[in-house]
Amino acid sequence: MTEIFAPGDVVRVATADPPGHIRTPYYIRGKQGVIERDCGEFANPEELGYGREGLPKKRLYRVRFKQKEVWSDYQGDPADTVDVDIYEHWLARPQTNASSGANR
Amino acid sequence: MKPDNTAFSSAKEPGRGYHDIGGLEGEPIDREITEAKPWEKLSVVLGYALGPKAAKVMRTDENRRAREEMGVDIYNQLGYFERGIEATRRVLLEKGLFTEQELEARMAQIAKRIAEEGR
């Protein structure tokens, strides 16, 4: 059902703000990054948090973001990056070429 | 100044939990390394003992969820290990492993024993 991404694929994190226990940090929602690796499949923590089984498992990706694109006032090296582990249902291919994070 | 997480879940930032403070202005990090207190170590061991590889009573995810539900005032008052043990208390009460009255009675019993026997 869900597309499987490969290292190097460009993805955007959903801007969703659902209620409940979620592991996608607020600061990275809506940002665009690149798949660094496929970490494998894990029981879904959004379900496990409520004592459910967390099935079907969700694929977890390590996604690499440019610090300058995550923090508008970033003063460090433009090449600096931050890696965030994000579950598949939070990721999609960008719809447009608009610069990342414009909606935050 | 500590990061102001008291106004989250507002119209301005509806999806941001009070625990989710990444990127906010905060205080300098205290880098002094202190020895963990015995009860803090015990609280970590308790987490493993209750976990999926042992008693299968509480997962880390449930404990995290309970930390996010205790309310910002309590959350901000507690330290890291205190949040963990308070969340554990809440999850075990939810699951009906004991009642609040039973827990209070047991704590009073232990406090009395320590007062009388020193341990």
Image: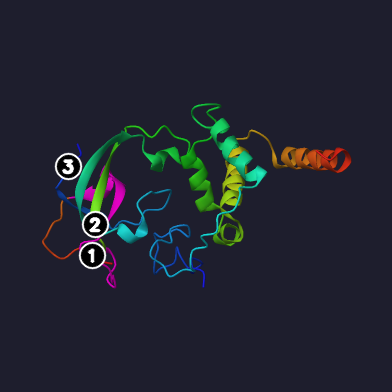
Judge whether B109 appears above or below A100 on screen: above
Q: Which residues are magenta?
A: A68-92
Which residue is at the far top? B54
Instruction: Name the spot of residue B57 as percent of width and height, x first.
Output: 55, 31
Q: Residue at x 22, y 68 (%)?
A: A102
Q: Chain of mark 1?
A: A
Which residue is at the far left? A97
Instruction: Tell which of B41 and B19 is nearer to you.
Output: B41
Instruction: Name the spot of residue B108 as percent of width and height, x first.
Output: 80, 42
Q: CA distance from mark 3 to mark 1?
A: 21 Å
For marks 3 and 2 on the same chain, the one whose residue lies earlier in the sequence: 3
Instruction: Name the spot of residue A69 as percent of width and height, x first.
Output: 23, 65
Q: Which residue is mark 3?
A: A5
Q: Which residue is mark 1?
A: A69
Question: Which type of secondary structure does the marked residue at label 3 adopt?
Answer: loop
Question: Which type of secondary structure does the marked residue at label 1 adopt?
Answer: helix
Judge whether A73 appears above or below A26 on screen: below
Q: Which residue is mark 2?
A: A65
Is residue B1 shown left or right of residue A43? right
Q: CA distance from mark 3 to mark 2?
A: 16 Å
Is residue B2 shown left or right of residue B37? left
How many other residues sit within 10 Å of disc 1, few (<14), some (14-19) or many (≥20)?
Answer: some
Q: Which colour assignment does the render follow? A: rainbow
Instruction: Name the spot of residue A12 as percent of width and height, x first.
Output: 21, 54
State if disc 2 and disc 1 touch (CB < 8 Å).
yes
Identity of the amino acid at label 2?
Answer: Phe
Q: Chain of mark 2?
A: A
